[in-house]
């Protein structure tokens, strides 16, 4: 190795020679094969360190049949939630010494999803995480060939597919219960787009909390996750508060923080005081939400935990083929700030009083 010319990089054969083992034994150590004596493994690892040997990734792929690359199929990554989940997946993969190859979808159709999986397969990925925010996307995925392990994220748990999801229902129920505990009995909801599984879970959680309190469920408004759609909804809330027919809304739960920001602006423009006249709450814990006036009460989703659980589940399926389908649910957390705090309190015996301890952990 020390000729007159440039020093060549050490090879697997050099490692085998220094360690006094065969080429195959070095391969087994590099692939973490269990059938290697600990003393032999230690000698090989010491030789690798002494020589500064770096395994050739292509050769290692041939030996281990692993590319150490994971695929991710994502859509709507301009939105806070999907972008944060993608970042969490990439971070968790790096911690496991895996690369991530991402394919973004402009349209969530079965054809587009199938083409994305084909492309990732041609790149030799070991497995794929598919972000499936729409119910029809999960159903389409279940119909497609799956030549490698696949895990869904935010696709719910209705189908027999391994997946990770935040408990949207529990988060929405907790934040509605928080508003009930403050004495609000007319709580409006600005829902997300109807095809989104997350929007559906938040809508159902809001409705369930009101029904459990024996309160009427007002018709919900619908937005598209944007502040503009929240602003339009907020104008309708302000109109109802200022003199619309029926009970006046005294609280609004928007299905994400961006729409809640639009609601806050509309109420400010209408001269409605928050939270004294109308309390406002959102979902996601957008960083900007803590710095508006008033700071926004919301539900925090642990996107780091979602990414970690998604990668852990995928690697388990890769390492242990035939593993039973597993569903992982991540708990959300209520974050109480001034947009709801300091408002009304329920009187003794009121329908909302029983919810004083039902709002979940405040942080």
Image (cartoon, rainbow, N blue to C red):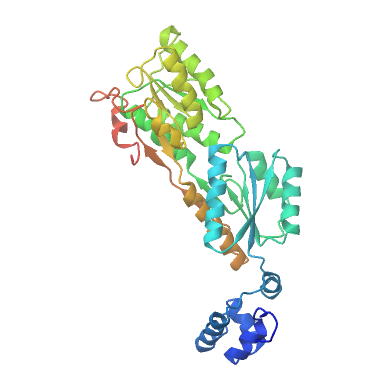
Left or right of 154 in this view: 301: left
Closer to the camera in the image, 24 or 156: 24
User: Dividing the picture into quarters, in which one does residue 323 lie?
Assistant: bottom right
Image vertical order of residue 272 relative to residue 332, above or below = above
Question: Position of 331 compared to 144: left or right?
Answer: left
Residue most toward the bottom? 20
Q: Tell me if 173 is positioned left or right of 84 in this view.
A: left
Quarter of the figure that contains the C terminus = top left
Count of numbered badges drawn on the protein:
0
Residue 35: x %, y % from top left:
57, 84
Q: From this viewpoint, is residue 146 visible? A: yes
Q: Quadrant of the N terminus?
A: bottom right
Question: Which is more toward the observer, 326 or 278?
Answer: 278
Q: Nearer the viewer, residue 71 or 9?
A: 9
Is residue 15 positioned above or below 186 on the image? below
- Residue 277 percent across, percent down from the top left: 35, 17
The residue depicted at 68 percent of the width and 87 percent of the height is 3
Residue 338 appears in which quarter of the rendering? top left
The residue at 53%/25% (across/down) is 227
Q: Is residue 304 left or right of residue 56?
A: left
Residue 211 position within the rendered picture, expressed as x and y whole percent measured from the top left: 42, 28
Q: Is residue 327 visible?
A: no
Q: Residue furthest front?
A: 4
Asked if residue 136 is positioned above or below residue 49 in the image, the reply reads above
User: x, y (%) of residue 204?
Assistant: 49, 33
């Amino acid at each position: 190795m020390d000729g007159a010319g440039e020093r060549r990089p050490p090879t697997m054969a050099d490692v085998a020679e220094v360690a006094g083992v065969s080429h195959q034994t070095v391969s087994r150590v590099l692939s973490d094969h269990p059938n290697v004596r600990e003393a032999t493994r230690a000698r090989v690892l010491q030789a690798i360190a002494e020589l500064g040997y770096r395994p050739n990734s292509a050769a290692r792929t041939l030996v281990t049949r692993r590319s150490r690359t994971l695929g991710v199929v994502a859509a709507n990554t301009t939105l806070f939630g999907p972008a944060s989940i993608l970042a969490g997946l990439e971070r968790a993969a790096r911690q496991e010494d895996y690369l991530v190859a991402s394919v973004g979808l402009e349209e969530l159709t079965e054809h587009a999803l199938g083409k994305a999986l084909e492309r990732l397969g041609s790149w030799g990925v070991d497995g794929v995480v598919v972000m499936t925010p729409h119910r029809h996307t999960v159903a389409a995925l279940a119909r497609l060939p799956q030549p490698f392990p696949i895990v869904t994220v935010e696709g719910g748990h209705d189908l027999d597919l391994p997946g990770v999801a935040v408990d949207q229902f529990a988060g929405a129920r907790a934040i509605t219960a928080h508003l009930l505990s403050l004495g609000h009995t007319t709580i409006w909801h600005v829902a997300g787009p109807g095809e989104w599984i997350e929007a559906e879970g938040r809508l159902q959680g809001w409705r369930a909390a009101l029904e459990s309190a024996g309160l009427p469920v007002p018709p919900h408004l619908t937005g598209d996750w944007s502040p503009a759609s929240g602003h339009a909804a907020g104008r309708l809330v302000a109109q109802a508060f200022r003199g619309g027919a029926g009970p006046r809304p005294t609280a609004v739960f928007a299905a994400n923080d961006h729409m809640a920001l639009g609601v806050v602006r509309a109420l400010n423009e209408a001269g409605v005081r928050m939270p004294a006249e109308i309390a406002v709450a959102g979902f996601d814990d957008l960083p900007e939400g803590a710095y508006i006036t008033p700071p926004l009460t919301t539900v925090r989703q642990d996107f780091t935990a979602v990414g970690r659980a998604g990668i852990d589940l995928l690697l388990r399926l890769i390492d242990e083929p035939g593993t039973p389908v597993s569903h992982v649910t991540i708990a959300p957390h209520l974050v109480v700030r001034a947009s709801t705090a300091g408002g009304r309190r329920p009187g003794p015996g009121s329908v909302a009083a029983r919810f004083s301890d039902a709002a979940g952990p405040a942080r």
